[in-house]
Amino acid sequence: MIPRYSRPEMVAIWEPQTRFKIWFEIEAHACDALAEIGVIPKASAKNIWDKAGNVTFDVARIDEIERVTKHDVIAFLTHLAEFIGPDSRFVHQGMTSSDVLDTCLSVQMTRAADILIQDVDDLLAALKRRAFEHKLTPTIGRSHGIHAEPVTFGLKLAEAYAEFSRCRARIVAARAEIATCAISGAVGTFANIDPRVEEHVAAKMGLKPEPVSTQVIPRDRHAMFFATLGVVASCIERLAIEIRHLQRTEVLEAEEFFSEGQKGSSAMPHKRNPVLTENLTGLARLVRGMVTPALENVALWHERDISHSSVERMIGPDATVTLDFALARLTNVIDKLLVYPANMQKNLDLLGGLVHSQRVLLALTQKGASREDAYAYVQRNAMPVWRGEGDFLDLLKKDADVKKLLSDAELEEKFDLGYHLKHVDTIFGRVFGQAG
């Protein structure tokens, strides 16, 4: 994590102070459950909360202890005992370090998912607003980067809205996948701690008990979580690349907002570069790069090893912080995106009507021409226009084979731009609901 690509709310989830507070809550809730079933005195459980429930943990002190113990949880428990006193002997009863570490990670990841879900909601709101704004703004659709047939700019944004709606559902599912608690002891058998303790801690921390935790929560859950983040990152990149292409000088159908005083180049004062969406492409690569280590974390030795630990200490904060920043940045780009309908129309007209070639092809087949002949008639008139030699409609009107089948009026009707937009309402209804 670096401040340049970080937002404070997400960063706070991963700060040491937050982590130690969650560790304490896990331990203290476990003590409450142990007291309730008669394993430790109720007064001791209360005292643990009273003595440490509102303290600010001394991170430097914990680090100092860990330099000796070479064990982070033991260092924390030692520091905790400095607050609690004699009743600290009841803390961590029957538990193992992974009970604390894995349950804490589940809490952090669910909190991170909640922020990401809100981020997507904000993006969806911006996409919906701009989609309806440009619902019927005609623009050229491209396949292979080449002019194909007319669409609308609103449809482009509606497509992104549908995509990020799926992303939202995936994050919700990933959140549910990761929201499990393990308080099951050294190898997950509950030999030294009652399963009711796990159930109590899970309820208090907003989680559900892990059915079989060995000594750790199974890492297929974590792999799915990070894989989901990678998919969301790829969706961010897809929309970012679309905007980058549309901002190219030769296209200039849309561009990032350029603020007062902003500079595009240190050398060329005229430049207005798509720096935000280029940045989003880079951030997406970074998030996706964290998916493979998460997948490789699934295979641990026997009931556990710690090969996953170093990976998760890095990718947990980095992936969620980076994706949070990227989603917020994309929302800002969409919200302020400059759209140029006149340039869209100019580009639509660039190929002299060739974008209507399929309508002419189909009309010829309806009049009795074979598909092969119809294709040949249309293509032989299209290719000169492609080379800049004439107007497509004029050439078709002069083609003897075409004239036998279609009148001038019938040909002209096939060049109606509105024809391509007749089902926009249907698509919008599917994406946004009939009420919009």
Image (cartoon, grey):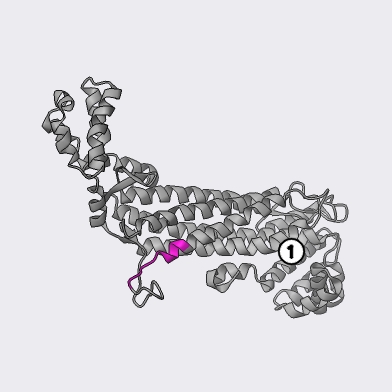
* Magenta span: 270-278
Q: Is residue 271 magenta?
A: yes
Q: Residue at x 24, y 32 (%)?
A: 380
Q: Give the image quarter of residue 106.
A: bottom right
Q: Is residue 120 magenta?
A: no
Q: Position of residue 404 (x, y in %)?
A: 14, 23
Q: Residue at x 23, y 23 (%)?
A: 366
Q: Position of residue 247 (x, y in %)?
A: 35, 59
Q: Residues within 10 Å of mark 1 (few under 14, many from 20)?
A: many
Q: Position of residue 431 (x, y in %)?
A: 39, 45
Q: Position of residue 387 (x, y in %)?
A: 25, 43
Q: Is residue 104 above or below residue 146?
A: below
Q: Is residue 434 visible?
A: no
Q: Residue type at mark 1: give it.
A: Ile
- Position of 187 compared to 296: left or right? right
Q: Is residue 198 visible?
A: yes
Q: Give the image quarter of residue 150.
A: top left
Q: Is residue 260 above or below residue 289?
A: below
Q: In front here: 220 or 146?
A: 146
Q: Is residue 62 above or below residue 213?
A: below
Q: In front here: 370 or 168?
A: 370
Badge 1 is on which residue?
26
- Position of 262 compared to 322: left or right? left
Quarter placement of the N terminus: bottom right
Assign a secondary structure to mark 1.
helix
Q: Residue at x 64, y 68 (%)?
A: 14
